[in-house]
Image (cartoon, grey):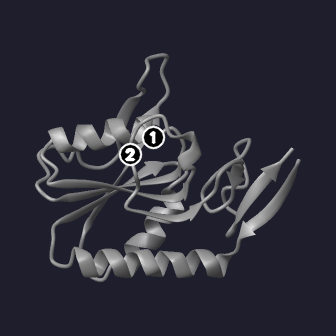
Amino acid sequence: MELKKIHDELEIASKIQEVGASISKRFFGENLLFVGILKGASIFTSDLLRAITFPCHYDFIQEIKSPEPISQISFLGGGWTNFNGIIFLLKDVIHSGVIENYLVTHFKEKGGKEVHILSVIDKPQERKVDIEPLHSLFVENEGTFAGYGMEYERKYGNLPYIAKVEV
């Protein structure tokens, strides 16, 4: 197994600032909730929050794997039911879009005014449902990734860059 660096720290930081500036300008003064999907989006969430130029809310959710078609979702902070604001779901890699589509529907049903998806990596060729992120730092057509919060074999998530895993 080899890790091939594809996006370095400076490139990631630049993209984070770009996305933060865009959101801050477009949604200035709105009631915002950023929801990081653990574990892979934890670093992305913390970096992006620091790039938002006005006060906002944040929380994390974790998908609890189950044999059901859609796994159970667990909130770590508040319940955020009836949140009457704009919600951003932060994901490490968007593959099929099934989980993201479920979460968008869930948050809209719970009172979210708007629900948007933000991702570190978007893999649109793997999409099984019609869903598009508002912003993705990078688009990659294929591969498995590690670093910047994304783990491979339960390690490498601490790397400050994004690498493609080559086996």
**Residue that badge 1 annotates:** 97
Q: Are marks 2 and 1 in contact (CB under 8 Å)?
A: yes
Residue ranking furthest to the top: 67
* Closest to the observer, 63 or 143: 143
Does 91 appear above or below 4?
above
**Mark 1: which amino acid?**
Gly
The numbered mark, 2 or 1, whose residue comes first in the sequence reads: 1
- Where on the picture, by quarter, is residue 14? bottom right
Side of 10 relative to 37 (left or right) = right
Which percent across, then down, holds residue 40?
55, 51
Q: Residues within 10 Å of mark 1 (few under 14, many from 20)?
A: many
Which percent across, then down, holds residue 70?
41, 25
Q: Tag on residue 131?
A: 2
Does 61 appear above or below 11?
above
Q: Residue at 29% of width from left, 79% of height from top?
A: 24
Side of 92 relative to 148 (left or right) = left
